[in-house]
Image (cartoon, helix red, strand yellow):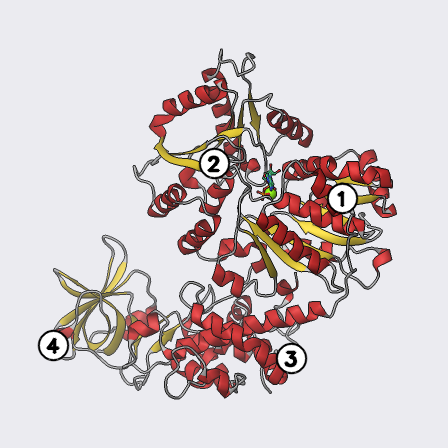
Amino acid sequence: MPDAAPAGAGRERLSGPQRALRRLGLVRPIDLALHVPLRYEDWTRVRPLADARDGDEALIEGEVLACEVLLRPRRQLVATLAVVGGGRCTLRFFTFYPSHQRALAVGARVRAHGELRGGWAGWTLVHPRLLSPDAPLPAGLTPVYPTTAGLPQPYLRTAVARALQQADLSETVPPEALADLPGAGGEPWTLQAALAFLHHPDPRAPRTALDDRTHPAWQRLKAEELLAQQLAQVRARRERDALRAPVLRAADDGLPWRLQSALPFALTGAQQRVVAEIAADLARPTPMHRLLQGDVGSGKTVVAALAAAVAVDAGWQCALMAPTEILAEQHFGKMVQWLEPLLAPLGRGVAWLTGSQPRAQRQAMLSRIAAGEAALVVGTHAVIQEQVTFERLGLAVIDEQHRFGVAQRLALRHKAGAAAAGMEPHLLMMSATPIPRTLAMSVYADLDVSTLDELPPGRSPIVTKVLAEHRRPEVMERIRQQVAQGRQVYWVCPLIEESEALDLRAATATHAELAAALQGVTGADGRPVQVGLLHSRLPPAEKKAIMAAFAAGALAVLVSTTVIEVGVDVPNASLMVIEHAERFGLSQLHQLRGRVGRGAVASVCLLLYSPGESGRVSESARERLRAMVETQDGFEIARRDLAIRGPGEFLGARQSGAPLLRFADLQTDEPLIEWARRWAPRLWQRHPGQAQRHLDRWLGGKLDYLKA
Ligand code: ADP
Ligand code: MG
């Protein structure tokens, strides 16, 4: 019986190791078969000490000459072996049991496996594994598996060995696809052979190819995994194509056209192209699932407004959701400014939903939304709450989508409303964090992607400088000059991971320092300049008032925690100071820097760092700061961030806990990703049964994350 979960899995009594297996997700035989070793130990031959080097892993055999428990410097069991082939070796145990003492009785013969340390006092093995000298030596390398508390290696080894016999490892990849594998020379490895090898490699196998996963058996396993991922994506796309969505098409002289003519600027070429791509999707009867990626400041908001205008012109509602109240508020302001004048004559308007609004206002908004009178609804997570019912939601836009989880995106998709029974709204996701190419090809392969690769004209580049903390006085001076010329400044306070309270204390102190430093300075209008303080603990109304004051120019300097990280748009701000920049991630720094350089004035970003107690900034922090100085291109930043940190950050909530790729690596396995992309659609088409079996084998029941 292939790969079925054990019967009655929920009720039976499990032993400790069995429970530990469950915790690791090792339930079916196939799960265990795919649980590949972390590394190997060589127990295949007994080594003489003569050809050993310090640090070598070795299996030695010998006779116990002495064995005693020492109490100083700490309690330990120490035995001396006369090693076969000559020489002596000390075995040392800091935790030990009577069984150790029995095995190491004077005169006994033992085998010991461990890492040899060669000091001035001769060879030592600390905590070696003791083996009986009578047992036959294994023919292959001994696997060491990733494990968890309560799951000893020997138990796991036995379980895996049994599973390798039981699991159905028959081929699901057709020969023509295997023959096409990059670098495949000669007879391709079967899955069965690859797994047998990876669990118990021949001791003569090249260890580096095993360690760096370039061995053909590894390639085969990675290819399988990547193929499963692509098959899942192809299936997700097909399932979506089977759904229905309203056809949204605007009249030639309808709202989008009128909005565009009313804008104070002309769209960039990239914006026009992207708007056309979106409009084409909206006019189709299947739900759009499109990601709009564009660097900070590339003008995504107006694209969202135009998409909304299409939906509204076609008689449907649109929702626009943003991850923070500040950003939602700002979007609301823009949508009102751009769309209300056009909607009011039609008796429709823009509604606003947030967790913090007064009850009565909220009720009023809810009934306008339910009645369809609110053509556009802007808000935070409040938009997807249960009480919110749309009359007919045709389009949902999610700004800074990587900040939202799968569940939230799903919730929005299920809100089409009574008038749209059986349909799903179109979905437009926006992000300033571009997805590196390999990720786009793999994890996001089920999305359509539009890219704004052009900034609006008239922007001058931002000059970025990295300064040590002791140059703070110069920074203060620079701020004085800027504000005296009527410019505005952001000062972002350090990120203190452990504690929001500490973040706040740092921000409050900096605020006081800046207020004191700017005392008596007058702005371009001759009035004394004001410094504001913004942080996440403030009540929403106050945040809103401070943001509004900064946007209106009444505050010259805004000291803030990272609450301004995303989306905030105040074009007159031309200087950004980030304190303790070494603590921030690269994408985060780039996002923050994107708050300046939004107008025509030349902007500057100063990254202050302090080496801390060690007197040094970590290598990765230095790489991040260097990247910030060297490039302003969001794609390049994303590429470097991926190199520094790995893909976790980009996946965000989409990953929902379980790592998507256990074996393949997005950096090094691009040719395999391309192979999987080529073959997944053909496999579904030509061998659907095999494709399904392949998916079940690799993903079991964990497919939900792909549906959002
Ligand atoms: P982001 O892509 O970071 O969300 P925004 O939508 O906030 O960028 O746009 C940044 C700024 O550029 C805003 O002030 C916006 O009004 C302005 N803008 C957008 N498109 C254009 C354009 N085509 N020409 C001039 N300014 C534009
Ligand atoms: Mg934005």
Question: Disc 1 or 4, which lies upstream in sequence?
Answer: 4
- The answer to whether one can see residue 249 in this image is yes
| Residue 568 in picture, x, y percent from top left | 59, 36
Q: CA distance from mark 1 to mark 4?
A: 83 Å
Image location of residue 474, percent across then percent down:
37, 23
- Marks 3 and 4, how far apart in space? 55 Å
Mark 3 touching mark 4, by CB under 8 A? no
Separation (CA) of disc 2 from disc 3: 66 Å
Specify whether tag 1 is near ligand 2 (CB below 8 Å).
no
What amino acid is found at the position of numbered circle 3 in the picture? Ala
Query: In the rendered structure, which amino acid carries the disc numbered 1?
Result: Val
Mark with earlier residue (3, 4): 3
Q: Tag 2: residue type?
A: Ser
**Which residue does the numbered mark 4 point to in the structure image?**
86
Among the two numbered marks 1 and 2 on one chain, the one whose residue lies closer to the N terminus: 1
Q: Which image quadrant for residue 79?
A: bottom left
Residue 632, compared with residue 54, is above or below; it is above
Circle 1 or circle 4, nearest the eye: 1
Q: Choose the circle earlier in sequence order: 2 or 3.
A: 3
- Which residue is denoted by mark 2 in the rendering? 460
Side of 444 where 125 appears, left or right: left
Q: Which mark is residue 7?
A: 3
